[in-house]
Amino acid sequence: DIQMTQSPSSLSASVGDRVTITCRASQSISSYLNWYQQKPGKAPKLLIYAASSLQSGVPSRFSGSGSGTDFTLTISSLQPEDFATYYCQQSYSTPPTFGPGTKVDIK
Amino acid sequence: EVQLVESGGGLVQPGRSLRLSCAASGFTFDDYAMHWVRQAPGKGLEWVSGISWNSGSIGYADSVKGRFTISRDNAKNSLYLQMNSLRAEDTALYYCAKAPAHTVTSNWFDPWGQGTLVTVSS
């Protein structure tokens, strides 16, 4: 199975900050990398698919980049509604696997 | 609007069985693969199983292989997960999720249902 890691595991940031979350795969996954946002008590929500494609309805302050083994989710200007846990997921091979998550909270 | 509504969760003793259902609406159900993903309390996300549009291709996580069976009824727009020989470590919120295509590989998951809680305890 492909192992996914994320860094940091948590971060504290202020509204308006630029936030970057990193995801790394244990082997090359090309661009088969997706990002989700999960708020407490809610189901995960797809933000980015295929490494850099913004899901319909997701604000443009979210962006994704990377290929191979290293990927990045960037929030250009953090908004109050963005405080949540973020997960990456590889869809290169079965089983699809998720990173452990990055919790973004208020500084 | 695409909607996925899970049901069938509950408290069950170790070794017993449970069947989860996911009712889909707002899209042409038999055009898409579907998946189950679970989340243990306070933990991360774990893919459980996926099924292609026509049930021709099915996959399972190693942790549930041989105990869980995924199925779908396209006439009823419904997805199922039959869970047998349940263990304490199967305790989790179980989500159904829609794939972007009819094949079960190379999928992201969107949207997700609200989840149904399965608690395995004596």
Image (cartoon, coloured by chain):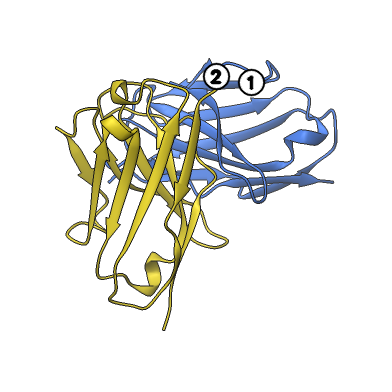
Residue A27, quarter of the rendered image: top left
Q: Are marks 1 and 2 on the same chain?
A: yes
Which amino acid lies under the numbered mark 1 shown in the image of this protein? Val
The single residue placed furthest to the left in the displayed view is B56
Which amino acid lies under the numbered mark 2 shown in the image of this protein? Gln
- Is residue B63 positioned above or below B59 on the image? below
The single residue placed furthest to the bottom in the displayed view is B122
Image quarter (top left, top right, bottom left or bottom right) of the C terminus of chain B: bottom left
Q: CA distance from mark 1 to mark 2?
A: 6 Å
Q: Residue A79, image x and y in percent?
A: 80, 30
- Residue A55 disc label: 2
User: Dot 2, crowdedness within 10 Å: few (<14), some or many (≥20)?
Assistant: some
Query: What is the letter of the blue chain?
Result: A
Residue A95 placement, left or right of B112: left
The residue at which mark 1 appears reads as: A58
Q: Are dots 1 and 2 in contact, CB under 8 Å?
A: yes
Judging from the image, mark 2 belongs to the subunit labelled A
Q: Please tell me how many numbered marks the rendered image carries.
A: 2
Task: From the viewer's side, name the closer residue of A62 and B15.
Answer: B15
Query: What is the letter of the yellow chain?
Result: B
- Residue A84 disc label: none
Residue A29 placement, left or right of A89: left
- Write the residue at 64% across / 21% down: A58
Task: From the viewer's side, name the closer residue of A36 and B119.
Answer: B119
Q: Residue B39, image x and y in percent?
A: 48, 55
User: Dot 1, crowdedness within 10 Å: few (<14), some or many (≥20)?
Assistant: few
- Write the residue at 18% across / 34% down: B55
Judging from the image, mark 1 belongs to the subunit labelled A
Q: Residue B65, image x and y in percent?
A: 20, 56
Image quarter (top left, top right, bottom left or bottom right) of the N terminus of chain B: top right
